[in-house]
Image (cartoon, rainbow, N blue to C red):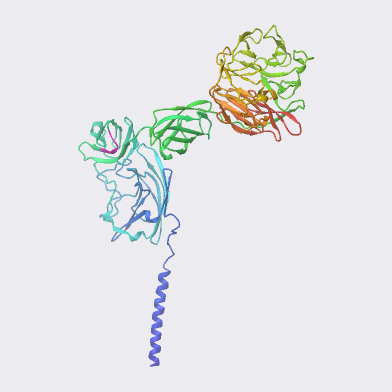
Amino acid sequence: MITHLQNTFKAVGFMLLIITFFSCSKSQKGPDVTPDKTKPALTAKINGADYNLAATDFTSTYYTADGDDIKALQTTANLDASGSKLVFFISDLKGGSVNLSKKAGTSLNPGNPALKVNATTATATPVQTYVQYINGGNIYFANSGSITVTINANTATVSWDIVFKDAAGKDFISNGSYTAANFTNNAKPKTQIVDPTPVSAKPTIESISPQQGKYNDTVTITGVNYSSVLTENIVKFNGVDAAVKTATPTRLRVLVPLTGTTGNISLKVKNSETVNGPVFTYGVPPNLIDVKPTEGRTGDLVTITGINFSNNPADVVVKFGTVSATVVTATTTQVTVKVPAGLKTGGFVPLTISIKGIISSSVSTYLVDAPYPNLNWEDLASINGLQNINQMAHMGQTLLITGGNNPGYLYYSADGKTYSNVYNNLPFNKSKKLVINVLKADKSSYYISTNQGIAKSTNGIFWTKLTPESTEPDSSFTGMAITSGYITIMRYTSLYRSSDGGASWRHTYINLPGLALNYIAGIYDAYSSNNLFAVDTSKNYTSKDEKLFYRSTNKGITWEATKGYTGIYYYNLGYKDFMAAASYSIFCAFSYKGAAQTEGSQRLYRSTNKGDSWTQVGTETCNVIKADSATVTYGSKTFNLSINDGVDFKSYPLPAGYTLGGIEITPSYYYITGFNTAGDRKIFRAAR
């Protein structure tokens, strides 16, 4: 009995050993190839668009046949909800690389109906390896590139780097990879393989370009088996005949018909059956209404306003000339873009917008400005006699500097580096207190207005007194404009103009409406030959009233008050360069009534309508403003520069520790005066 039990236990133990051995052998059959479910099973980039798909977003079919060692794998990936797909067919599934050739039966390779392509067995359907991309009803076949296959047990990893060609003949690329786990689970006989482009005699429509447009636009259709005889190709847009412009066996170019509507494009060639292609959408062209700003430089933001735009930035193409811009935001009425690089500066380029390929009939223009310079300040001179706030003017390479408030100096420099005081050369009575009011210059002379009259110098060193009013040669003048060959000065109700450098003068009485004439200051350089501007600084600082701004559009003969009130100027405290005119804008520094009435409360304002309204520029205190054509500069704690008439400014740091007190713009340099808390006063310059 005992012997029997022992034999039984031995037998059972032997059987358990065998079971354990086979179990272990099965579990150790190969490595674990379970895919990482935290990662996308398919990643792809197609024509710039990225896709990341889960395993449930694509299916694979394994085609096999008894006695045939050549297997095939077809994978179909659903890219998005709109029906876009990516289809891979590998006719001979094995590890390694497959170089793609143009798919037979397509416009890229029409093929020969009498030949079989890549037949693997006598019973197999002759289908070559291909990659198919379906988007918006268009079908594209890769025409070059490669597919690489890696097989591990029943898991296949496929990567690709391929090129497609659209109906317009433009190449676009795709690359990516996918992992098909357990691909052998969905097996079908090879006899069920279906070639999407069987080589046959009937016409096909693969793709159209564009897929949206308007009457008389040209649409390109690609496929096979077309006729080179125009009239033998019958193309319809949702049932409406279209005129065929050109025809080859694989490409048609047709005109969008006037009475067509959105729907499928259809084609019949001679006596063939009718085939349907993608949907063509009749679009409403966008209408470009406004562009702001209308000038700038690479990287600037531009806002385009209109109608029939799109909320999808991918639908929008904005071009500056022939260069496309980056779309930042898009709505149905407004698009924001960045000015692209590569534009020629200093001129206008056409600005166009198209939505889904439909270009606006309205075109704007954009002025491309040069890039801002890099400013490196050069320390020229330290002059303790300078005031904190100064006036500067230049003629050629020479430079003059005087103070802002009751100065007793006038520094001259022939080269911008060394300075000498020529104050005592001024042709006025030094026994009386001499007050320099305004310093100006044109291309041939310097001019200075004082409380004892005005003077002129052709070299900045020696001066001649001018007498606009011969009966009162020592009359005080404040405002002075040098523009368009004229010297213009004003005193009370009298305006004097000279067109010969001050040798003779024309006197005109003026009437400024609403102004109790007492102290007129500031006729400043104009942005055209006929425009002059003036303000009243009398009792300005003490009264703190908002001020009228005056203009003349006929060289000062008649004047009118503008609609735009300014605030308080600090002219009487030495801030003489508080107003300037650029190419198309006027700039004025003031503080509005109600603001803190201190010198530091001045802000810069800009008017683009000759003073009828003002817009604040930045938040920095404005000690001085200077303009030269489209170049505008101002500041106090920084040097603010615009090279597009004040549309935008770039701020540059000043020399460390210094506050801005004066500016002059020469053809080669920006000159500034600066002061610090230690009482130092210096002159600096930076190359333009």
Quadrant of the rendered structure where residue 567 is? top right
In this rendering, is residue 44 above or below 572? below
Would you say residue 619 is visible in this rendering?
Answer: yes
Residue projecting furthest to the bottom: 1
**Residue that protrudes farthest toward the left in the picture:** 271
- The magenta stretch is 260-266
Q: Residue at x 45, y 57 (%)?
A: 38
Front residue (pair 179, 477): 477
Query: Is residue 265 magenta-colored?
Result: yes
In this picture, residue 686 sits left or right of residue 367 = right
> Could you tell me residue 455's position as x and y percent?
70, 13
Which of the 4 image quarters holds residue 584?
top right
| Picture coordinates of residue 281, whole percent (x, y) | 32, 37
- Where residue 390 sits: x, y (%)? 70, 25
Q: Position of residue 362 (x, y in %)?
A: 41, 27
Picture quadrant where residue 548 is located: top right
64 sits to left or right of 416: left
Residue 19's place in the image compared with 426, above or below, is below
Residue 360 against residue 549 in the figure, above or below? below
The quadrant of the image that shows the N terminus is bottom left
Residue 95 visible within the image: no
* Viewer-proximal residue among 101 and 239: 239
The answer to whether 138 appears left or right of 288 in the picture is left
Q: Is residue 232 magenta?
A: no
